[in-house]
Amino acid sequence: MGERHLGLRGDSNKQTWEEADFPIVCTACLGQNKYIRMMKTHFDRACRVCERPYTVFRWRPTARERFRRTEICQVCARSKHVCQCCVNDIETGVPVHERDKHIDLDNKFEAPKDIVNRDFWAQMKAMEVSKEIEKEKKISEDQEKAQKNVKSLEDNK
Ligand SMILES: [Zn+2]
Ligand SMILES: [Zn+2]
């Protein structure tokens, strides 16, 4: 019986970034306060897109405002480049259905309905996302190195 769970091992990769300390949210949702307290609950709710449990973040933009919380998981947010809270484009704030109307009609923002396909879909997305994160990390490391090189060249002048 226990053996059957081994198939899920591949998920351990995914956990590392899904355990992130900060959600992917746009500045409109986050608010202006730099010192907000971010609260997180592990796998508390299901993502509205893929319906899988994920780490939910809650915060209050200002003391007078109501709590906001994430509605979709980081996989879905990253794969569509949207805010985890309002689900609008993370940079432009354009609603995703508006945005995608113009660019990719084939790439609908939807997870498959049946559970087997959906798990597969989510796993593929998770893999794409972690690859992307790796790539970004590599790029910023390279940039750092390049900067250091420039700096040491300057120091040698
Ligand atoms: Zn999701
Ligand atoms: Zn937002």
Image (cartoon, grey):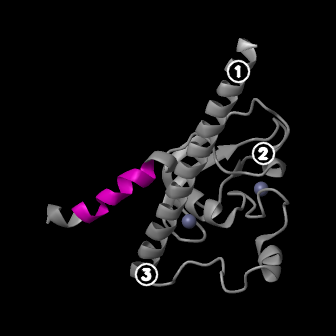
SS class of the residue under badge 2? Answer: helix
Q: Is residue 82 left or right of residue 16?
A: right
For the residues carrying marks 1 and 3, which lies nearer the camera in this image? 1
Of residues 2 and 90, the one nearer the viewer is 90
- Is 13 a magenta residue? yes
Residue 133 position within the rendered picture, expressed as x and y whole percent measured from the top left? 56, 51
**Residue 153 has which mark?**
1
Residue 69 position within the rendered picture, expressed as x and y whole percent measured from the top left? 68, 52
Q: Residues within 10 Å of mark 1 (few under 14, many from 20)?
A: few
Which badge, 1 or 2, is on the more N-terminal residue? 2
Of residues 96 and 67, the one nearer the viewer is 96
What residue is at 83 percent from the left and 43 percent from the top? Answer: 31
Q: Is residue 134 left or right of residue 24?
A: left
Quadrant into which the C terminus falls: top right
Q: Are marks 1 and 3 in contact (CB under 8 Å)?
A: no
Q: Is residue 106 above or below residue 49?
A: below
| Count of marks overlaid on the render | 3
Asked if disc 1 is less than 8 Å from ligand 2, the answer is no
- Determine the CA span between mark 1 and mark 2: 40 Å
Q: Which residue is mark 3?
A: 117
SS class of the residue under badge 3? Answer: helix
Q: Which residue is mark 2?
A: 30
Q: Is residue 127 visible?
A: yes
Of residues 142 and 82, the one nearer the viewer is 142
